[in-house]
C-alpha cells in the first residue's frame, strides 16, 4: 500500500458509534481475562492489550502450568484462542460461532460474545471468571445482561486497526528517544486508547481518582510518579472525532498556555490535556513528522516546566534504517 489514504485510513467518526461501543465491550471482556490471570505489574502494565499484525492481542496469559493467548483478528474478523497445549478455537465476529458451534446469525450481542468466549475457555480446560461490570463506562450494563450492543461493521473496525498500526509505529519511534523508565506502547481497553508514557523517576502527589467504574487506588498507583503521556483515542458518542492527546501528571504550571506543535493542536480544559485531530495528521504532507512534532513538543514543554533531568533521561533517536547494523559492525 502506497497511497496515504491507505496507510493512514479515514476513520468513520460519528458514523460508527454503534460498532465502536460494541467493540469497546468485546475488547474489555478479553482484556479483563488477561488482567484476571496475569501477575500485577506496576502502573497497570499487566492489563493492556497489544497491537498485532492483524488486530489486538493479550500476549501469553498464564493458566496454571500452561497458558493461552486471545487475539482479535480484524482482517479475518474473528477472535482466536490458542493454548500452550495445542488447542485452538475461533469465534467469528460477524456472526459465525466458535469452531463447531454452527452459529451463523448476525453480529453477537455483548452478552452472547461474553458467553461464547467463556465457553471457548471452558472447552480447552482453562476456565476464567472475571468482574463483569465494564470499566470506565458510566452506568454500564454488565456483560452477561447486555443485549443492546450488537453491532459490528468489519470495514470500520479494520480502519481503526490500521490507524492503531500507524500510530503505534510512530509511538514506538518516539519511545526510543527516552532512556528513563517508559511504558510499552499498549492499548488500554478501559479508556479504549493506545498510549505510551514516560516517567521522571520522582514521586507525584496522590491522584484524585473519580474515574467511573475504576478503583481510586488503581489510579493512584498508576500515577504514583511524575509522567508525560501521549496516545491515540478513537472517540465516543459524546466526542466522536478521533484525536491524539498529550498530558502530564501532575500538570505543571504554564502547560495549558504553552504553544505545542504542530499548528492545529489545542488545549482541552475539561480533560487537562492537549489534543491533535487525527484528520490533521492523516492529511498532512508528512503524517509521521506531523505527529512526531506533537509528541516531542508536548513532552519537551511539560518536562522543562516540571524541571525534569532531560539530559539524563533522553537520548538521540537512532538514525537511518541501517543504524543497528552499523552498531553491530562497530562493536566487532
Image: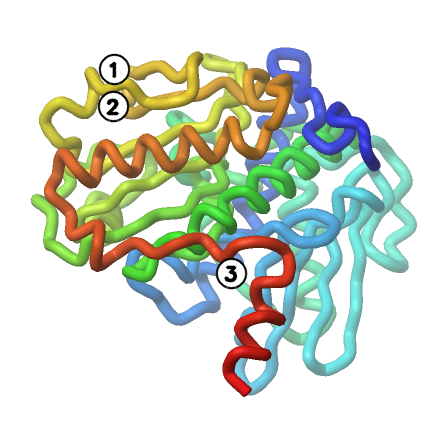
Residue position marked by numbered label 1 in the rendering = 269
Q: Tell me, yes or no, if residue 51 can be seen here.
A: yes
Quadrant where the C terminus sits is bottom right
Residue 108 x, y percent position in the rendering: 74, 36
Indicate the secondary structure of the residue bearing disc 1: loop
* Dot 2 and dot 3 residues touching (CB under 8 Å): no
Q: Nearer the viewer, mark 2 or mark 3?
A: 2
Along the viewing direction, whichever of 326 and 21 lies nearer the viewer: 326
Q: Earlier in the sequence, mark 1 or mark 3?
A: 3
Tell me the residue at 63%/39% (across/down).
Answer: 166
Residue position marked by numbered label 3 in the rendering = 34
Residue 252 placement: quadrant: top left
Q: Earlier in the sequence, mark 2 or mark 3?
A: 3
* Dot 2 and dot 1 residues touching (CB under 8 Å): yes
**Structural distance between the alpha carbons of marks 2 and 3:** 30 Å
Tell me the residue at 71%/26% (across/down).
Answer: 9
Q: Tell me, yes or no, if residue 217 can be seen here.
A: no
Along the viewing direction, whichever of 26 and 271 lies nearer the viewer: 271
> On residue 319, which mark appears?
none
* Dot 1 and dot 3 residues touching (CB under 8 Å): no
Along the viewing direction, whichever of 278 and 91 lies nearer the viewer: 278
The answer to whether residue 228 is left or right of residue 264 is: left
Residue 60 x, y percent position in the rendering: 59, 70
Tell me the residue at 84%/46% (across/down).
Answer: 76
Indicate the secondary structure of the residue bearing disc 2: loop
> On residue 272, which mark appears?
2
At label 2, counting other C-alpha atoms closer than 10 Å, the crowd grade (few under 14, some 14-19, many 20 or more) is some
Residue 285 x, y percent position in the rendering: 63, 21
Q: Is residue 55 above or below residue 239?
A: below
Q: Is residue 324 above or below residue 114?
A: below
At label 1, counting other C-alpha atoms closer than 10 Å, the crowd grade (few under 14, some 14-19, many 20 or more) is few
At label 3, counting other C-alpha atoms closer than 10 Å, the crowd grade (few under 14, some 14-19, many 20 or more) is many
Amino acid at each position: 500500500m502506497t497511497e496515504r489514504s491507505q496507510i493512514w485510513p479515514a476513520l468513520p467518526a460519528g458514523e460508527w458509534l454503534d460498532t465502536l461501543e460494541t467493540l469497546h465491550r468485546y475488547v474489555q471482556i478479553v482484556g479483563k481475562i488477561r488482567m484476571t490471570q496475569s501477575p500485577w505489574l506496576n502502573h497497570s502494565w499487566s492489563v493492556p492489550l497489544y497491537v498485532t499484525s492483524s488486530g489486538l492481542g493479550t500476549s501469553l496469559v498464564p493458566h496454571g502450568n500452561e497458558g493461552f493467548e486471545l487475539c482479535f483478528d480484524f482482517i479475518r474478523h474473528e477472535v482466536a484462542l490458542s493454548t500452550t497445549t495445542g488447542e485452538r478455537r475461533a469465534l467469528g465476529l460477524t456472526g459465525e460461532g466458535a469452531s463447531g458451534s454452527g452459529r451463523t446469525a448476525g453480529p453477537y450481542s455483548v452478552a452472547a460474545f461474553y458467553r461464547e468466549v467463556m465457553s471457548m475457555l471452558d472447552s480447552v480446560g482453562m476456565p476464567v471468571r472475571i468482574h463483569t461490570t465494564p470499566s470506565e463506562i458510566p452506568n454500564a450494563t454488565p456483560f452477561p445482561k447486555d443485549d443492546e450492543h450488537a453491532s459490528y461493521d468489519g470495514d470500520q473496525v479494520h480502519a481503526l486497526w490500521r490507524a492503531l498500526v500507524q500510530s503505534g509505529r510512530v509511538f514506538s519511534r518516539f519511545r526510543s528517544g527516552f532512556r528513563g523508565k517508559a511504558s510499552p506502547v499498549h492499548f488500554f481497553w478501559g479508556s479504549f486508547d493506545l498510549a505510551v508514557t514516560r516517567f521522571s523517576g520522582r514521586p507525584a502527589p496522590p491522584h484524585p481518582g473519580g474515574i467511573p467504574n475504576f478503583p481510586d487506588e488503581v489510579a493512584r498507583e498508576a500515577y504514583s510518579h511524575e509522567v508525560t503521556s501521549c496516545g491515540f483515542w478513537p472517540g465516543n458518542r459524546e466526542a466522536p472525532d478521533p484525536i491524539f492527546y498529550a498530558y502530564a501528571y501532575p500538570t505543571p504550571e504554564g502547560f495549558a498556555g504553552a504553544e505545542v506543535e504542530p499548528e492545529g493542536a489545542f488545549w482541552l480544559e475539561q480533560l487537562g490535556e492537549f489534543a491533535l485531530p487525527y484528520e490533521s495528521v492523516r492529511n498532512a504532507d508528512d503524517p509521521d513528522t506531523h505527529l512526531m512534532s506533537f509528541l516531542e513538543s508536548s513532552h519537551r514543554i511539560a518536562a522543562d516546566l516540571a524541571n525534569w533531568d532531560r539530559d539524563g533521561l533522553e537520548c538521540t533517536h537512532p538514525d537511518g534504517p541501517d543504524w543497528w547494523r552499523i552498531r553491530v559492525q562497530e562493536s566487532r
